[in-house]
Amino acid sequence: MSQMRYVLLLRGTLCWAVSSDIHNISMEYPGMQVTATQICKQAFPSEQYVRAEMVISGSNQCKLKCKYEEYTDFGTEEHSTYREAPDYTPCGEKKVCVRGFCVDAPKGMPTRPVEKVTTAKPDSAGTRRSTTFRWITRRRRNAI
């Protein structure tokens, strides 16, 4: 608080005065402007096939699970991370995310179709990697 007071006193009121009379009344929110997939492509910019999945926890919190698959000699590795869903990102039938929670969309508000919704608890905020070793197991059985 003291740092804010210092900056305000240093720059004076003229610097902090609002000089614009324009107000945004377009009623468009970030989740209406970008898709979940576009947000997830920012999480993995070098990957071509990134998928987005809306994850709703038990407390109605909504997050985006961003993931892509990598094919290796040992099977398929899924890399994933979680991102905050922007306000008004679709999270169910006539539902949108507002401040991180999946709520009923206001009446008359346009909504987009949901890409995919999963009702599960997000693991953590970090990037996760899970590996599927089905191919190796089958190959070992055939060798015996």
Image (cartoon, rainbow, N blue to C red):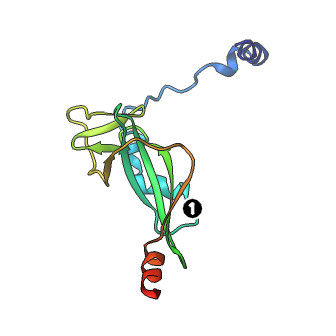
Of 103 and 123, the residue lying toward us: 123
Q: Position of residue 116 (x, y in %)?
A: 31, 53
Q: Amino acid at mark 1?
A: Pro
Q: Position of residue 66 (x, y in %)?
A: 46, 54
* In-image side of 30 versus 18 (left or right): left
Residue at screen point 25% across, 37% down:
109
Task: Spot the residue most to the front.
Answer: 144
Q: Secondary structure at mark 1?
A: loop
Residue at screen point 20% across, 35% down:
108
Q: Quadrant of residue 60?
A: top left
How many discs appear? 1
Q: Position of residue 4 (x, y in %)?
A: 71, 17
* In-image side of 118 versus 137 (left or right): left
Of 132 and 104, the residue lying toward us: 132
Q: Mark 1 highlights which residue?
A: 45
**Residue 2 sits above or below residue 68 on the image:** above
Q: Can you see residue 27?
A: no
Q: Position of residue 64 (x, y in %)?
A: 43, 47
* In-image side of 68 versus 58 (left or right): right
Residue at screen point 49% across, 45% down:
83
